[in-house]
Amino acid sequence: MYTQLQQRDMESPPVNVGTLRRMKEQRVPIACLTAYDASFALLVDQGGTDLVLVGDSLGMVIQGHDTTVPVTVEDVIYHSRHVARRLRRAFLVADMPFMSYTTPEQALSNAVRLMQEGGAMMVKLEGGAGQVAIVEHLARHDIPVCAHLGLKPQSVHKIGGFRVQGRDRSVADQMLEDARALEAAGADIVLLECVPNDVGATITRALEVPVIGIGAGPDVNGQILVLYDILDITQGRKPRFVQDFMAEAGTPAAAIRAYVEAVKQRVYPAPEHCFS
Ligand code: KIV
């Protein structure tokens, strides 16, 4: 009963939504990574990662697709279940795949599956103002939500490629408005992908909830990268925000620790990883 009361006395108690909020208030950078299996989950947890995402990037890095579009709810549950088994401290977020949240009812039933069958503590969905009703519905049922703005990989066929979002003033203003609306609807975290530094900084200042960035500059509350990118497993041309931590570290465990340390010390992202 109330296991969390005992966990509060642990040296490194499990991260929860309150921890992430306090980290924002106290300006402690939040280090996040993706993971897709139990072995890597253990390494990222032991390496000090605060938040682990079972991202639909699994469609690209695990399944070999060109986009995240083919990923299903079953796929995310399968991977999330295995990741959940090895996390002790890190907070587990699972992605809602393409077209798994088209109505509030569908979103709720899939989010419940990700939590009950996949062990997720929060679900992440892509979208702007169009998702406000969905986020409200999930929040009303006490489902923690991360709202993903900026570059939304599930929309890649609509936007015509993976490109920086928010360079245009009107697009940046709309993103800020969307972020505020999603926070008001009950989102607990906002994730910003591939936006100029000033857009990342403005949205972070405007919100009370933590803002996690991937290619969103140094002024957000936390950073996330795809695990296989920091381990230099991903082949081909890499996004500008990717840093290979494996080359110097030598082992996956050391590379993960080096990434977490670089985020905590605000050494990552460096100017060469950012967009203007
Ligand atoms: O699917 C994923 O891994 C993500 C990250 C790139 C943030 O959404």
Image (spheres, rainbow, N blue to C red):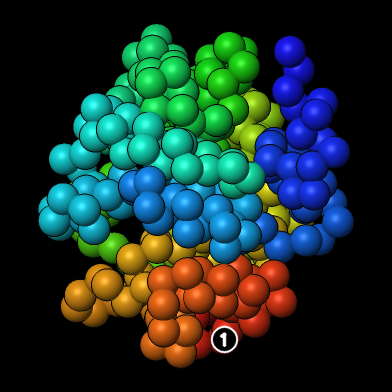
Q: Is residue 134 above or below residue 120?
A: above
Residue nearer the viewer, 245 or 178: 245
Q: Is residue 1 above or below residue 173?
A: above
Q: Is residue 218 above or below residue 40?
A: below
Residue at 20% x, 75% y is: 235
Quadrant where the image shows the N terminus: top right
- In the image, residue 84 lies at what x, y percent? 46, 36
Residue 164's image quarter? bottom left
- In the image, residue 100 lies at what x, y percent? 30, 25
Residue at 50% x, 58% y is: 44
Residue 140 visible within the image: yes
Residue at 34% x, 47% y is: 37
Give the secondary structure at mark 1: helix
- In the image, residue 110 lies at what x, y percent? 36, 19
- In the image, residue 215 lies at what x, y percent? 49, 68
Residue nearer the viewer, 82 or 62: 82
Total label count?
Answer: 1
Identity of the amino acid at label 1?
Answer: Pro
Task: Bin the neighbour count of mark 1 within 10 Å (Cα to Cα): few under 14, some 14-19, many 20 and up.
Answer: few
- Residue 152 left/right relative to 223: left
Residue nearer the viewer, 213 or 46: 46
State yes or no: Cβ of the residue under disc 1 lies below 8 Å from any atom of ligand 1.
no
Residue 199's image quarter? bottom right
Residue 202 visible within the image: no
Residue located beneath label 1 in the image: 271
